[in-house]
């Protein structure tokens, strides 16, 4: 019996170290003024494995829909566009940041208040799932003219 437990433990340990190949850091969610129904999450994903991995979806219960978006420049305007996945090459990292890739929340159920936090779950095409808690922060709108333009 004790030998069996030992085997089970080492198996668990190796599963854990495999999951650690993907790391999330520098995460935050944009605080919203009252009655604004959209927001976004930003984070850095580091891929410490050899393999290219794709972020394929994100879920959270704070909004009706959660999508992966990027910003593209079209006719001189920055526009948001939904993407199917975000690629993270082996031994590389990708930053989701204002003006680029982001996790989009559509149909917020509540205002997002700075100082609170949001639980989000990230799903990858290799089967990895990362559950994380992102702090809500006020983001200064220095280069966010484009955002106000298309609202
Ligand atoms: Cu968006």
Image (cartoon, rainbow, N blue to C red):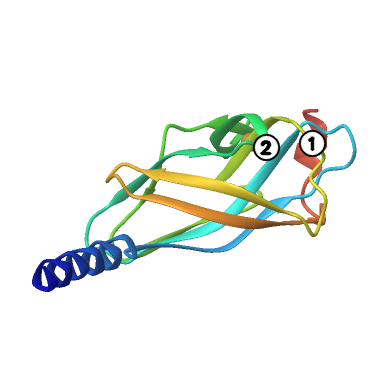
Q: Quadrant of residue 66?
A: top right
Q: CA distance from mark 2 to mark 1?
A: 7 Å
The reply to whether discs 2 and 1 touch (Cβ–Cβ < 8 Å) is yes
Residue toward you, 123 or 140 = 123
Horizontal placement of 119 versus 5: left or right? right
Residue toward you, 85 or 110 = 110
**Residue 76 visible in the displayed image:** no
Looking at the image, which residue is at 82% across and 36% down? Answer: 148
Residue behind mark 2 = 62
Looking at the image, which residue is at 41% across and 43% down? Answer: 123
Where does the image place residue 16, in percent across and percent down from the top left? 30, 64
The relative height of residue 142 versus residue 49 in the rendered view (above or below) is above
| Disc on the earlier residue, 2 or 1 | 2
Where does the image place residue 117, in percent across and percent down from the top left? 70, 54
Element at label 1: loop
Where does the image place residue 20, in percent across and percent down from the top left? 34, 65
Looking at the image, which residue is at 31% across and 41% down? Answer: 125
Looking at the image, which residue is at 80% across and 28% down? Answer: 151
Looking at the rendering, the quadrant in which ligand 1 lies is top right
Residue behind mark 1 = 110
Q: Quadrant of residue 97?
A: bottom right
Horizontal placement of 109 versus 22: left or right? right
């Amino acid at each position: 019996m004790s030998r069996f437990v030992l085997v089970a433990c080492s198996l668990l340990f190796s599963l854990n170290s495999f999951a650690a190949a993907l790391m999330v850091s520098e995460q935050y969610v944009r605080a919203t003024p009252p009655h604004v129904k959209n927001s976004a999450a930003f984070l850095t994903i580091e891929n410490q494995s050899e393999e290219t991995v794709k972020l394929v979806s994100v879920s959270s219960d704070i909004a009706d829909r959660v999508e992966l978006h990027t910003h593209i420049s079209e006719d001189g305007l920055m526009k948001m566009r939904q993407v199917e996945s975000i690629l993270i090459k082996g031994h590389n990292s990708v930053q989701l940041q204002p003006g680029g890739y982001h996790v989009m929340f559509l149909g917020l159920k509540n205002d997002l208040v700075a100082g609170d936090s949001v639980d989000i779950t990230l799903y990858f095409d290799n089967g990895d799932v990362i559950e994380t808690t992102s702090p809500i922060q006020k983001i200064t709108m220095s280069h966010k003219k484009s955002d106000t333009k298309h609202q």
